């Protein structure tokens, strides 16, 4: 299938226990949609039989299956990045391999995309995870809402659909750690959200330890906001300016009141002055680091959706031929 309508992208990490059930539910669900599709599996360096099972599935359904085998574990979001680079569909749908998001819901996302949205997020109805995960997730959603410009109800739900234009934009990003739903949102023009069912993990255990969950949330917060850095740099600059005023105040007191507390205040003045210089320097470095960080992420500086312009007229032609270009959804331009 060279150019299907739907590409389903599935990262797989040590999922041998549930993969067969996934195959048995996924393909019939996609066949039922009655449109062309491909399934792109990314084996994220599994240490169990997942890779062998994906190879076997490829032998069985070579027309609709594509498999990318990573040599080592790179993380769920990098696996999805690889899927985006290799997928060929107009609509890319990401879904987890553990059947927590039922594949039968893919049709709902596709229907929404066909209405003209370019990003369909999802909200887990009756989320089937531990209480700790649900509360922590609500707190992180709240924090993200405040410090970034990304608006999502349920950032953790990976059952999402993206347009070809968004996939192309993501493919032009070179960052080494990211959070796909947020990155995609930053490129979306018409995003929307729908509710989807959520089930318990069918087999195996969550592949995220507490540590990797914390790392993932750092990727999200630092990848989409400079606020933590800017908070410190601005606070450093503000405190150093205040201490400069204090030094002036102490110097004036020395002139008009004379030496106090045996010169301790003068010593204070000198110390505050030096601390002020250091904090100011830290604040300035913070601002430079923020700019370096923006630069090294290599995200596209802007995305051109279409270009309307008159074609350049040839000298021999009598009148200019108006040939306005209404090319829709051009590829991202750097
Ligand atoms: N996954 C992956 N690489 C990893 C961790 C997870 O490809 O390093 C895949 C995993 O196989 C699953 C999806 O990402 O398809 C979501 O993982 P999981 O269900 O363990 O996360 P949770 O639902 O607990 O957030
Ligand atoms: Mg899961």
Image (cartoon, helix red, strand yellow):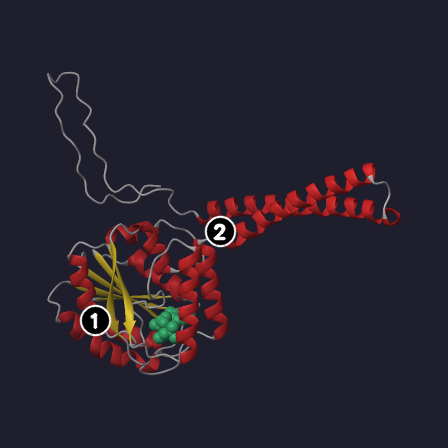
Q: Nearer the viewer, residue 293 or 55?
A: 293
The residue furthest right is 262
Please state if 69 lies on the left or on the right of 237 as rendered.
left
Instruction: Determine the residue positioned at 49% across, 52% down.
Output: 227
In this orientation, does residue 207 appear?
A: no
The residue furthest front is 257
Quadrant assignment, res 154: bottom left
Relative to 175, residue 321 above or below: above
Please state if 29 lies on the left or on the right of 290 as rendered.
left
Instruction: Determine the residue positioned at 32% across, 67% down.
Output: 158
Q: Name the quarter showing ligand 2.
A: bottom left
- Graded by Cα atoms within 10 Å as few (under 14), some (14 to 19) or many (20 or more), the crowding at tag 1 reads some
Quadrant assignment, res 167: bottom left
> Mark 1 and mark 2: span between their CA atoms?
36 Å
Quadrant assignment, res 316: top left
Task: Please name the residue that numbered disc 2 is placed on.
Answer: 226
Residue 95 image point, x, y percent:
29, 68
Helix, strand or loop under label 2: loop
Relative to 274, residue 184 above or below: below
């Amino acid at each position: 299938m060279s150019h299907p309508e739907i590409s389903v992208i599935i990262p797989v990490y040590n999922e041998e226990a549930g993969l067969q059930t996934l195959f048995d539910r996924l393909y019939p669900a996609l066949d039922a949609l009655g449109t062309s599709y491909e399934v792109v599996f990314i084996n994220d360096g599994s240490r169990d039989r997942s890779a062998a099972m994906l190879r076997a599935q490829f032998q069985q359904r070579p027309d609709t299956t594509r498999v990318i085998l990573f040599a080592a574990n790179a993380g769920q979001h990098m696996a999805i990045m690889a899927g985006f680079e290799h997928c060929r569909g107009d609509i890319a749908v990401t879904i987890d391999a553990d059947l927590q998001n039922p594949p039968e819901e893919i049709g709902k996302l596709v229907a929404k995309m066909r209405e003209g949205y370019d990003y369909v997020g999802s909200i887990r109805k009756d989320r089937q995870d531990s209480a700790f995960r649900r509360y922590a997730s609500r707190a992180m959603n709240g924090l993200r809402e405040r410090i970034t410009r990304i608006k999502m109800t349920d950032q953790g739900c990976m059952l999402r659909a993206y347009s070809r234009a968004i996939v192309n934009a993501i493919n032009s990003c070179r960052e080494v750690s990211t959070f796909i739903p947020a990155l995609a949102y930053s490129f979306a023009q018409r995003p929307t959200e729908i509710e989807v069912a959520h089930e318990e993990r069918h087999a195996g255990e969550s592949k995220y330890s507490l540590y990797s969950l914390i790392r993932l949330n750092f990727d999200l917060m630092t990848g989409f906001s400079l606020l933590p850095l800017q908070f410190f740099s601005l606070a450093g600059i503000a405190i150093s300016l205040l201490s400069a005023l204090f030094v002036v105040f102490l110097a004036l007191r020395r002139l008009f009141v004379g030496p106090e507390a045996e010169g301790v205040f003068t010593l204070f003045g000198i110390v505050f002055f030096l601390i002020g210089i250091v904090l100011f320097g830290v604040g300035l470095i913070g601002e430079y680091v923020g700019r370096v960080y923006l630069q090294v992420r290599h995200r596209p500086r802007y995305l051109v959706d279409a270009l309307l312009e008159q074609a350049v007229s040839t000298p021999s032609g009598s009148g200019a031929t108006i040939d306005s270009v209404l090319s829709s959804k051009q590829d991202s331009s750097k």
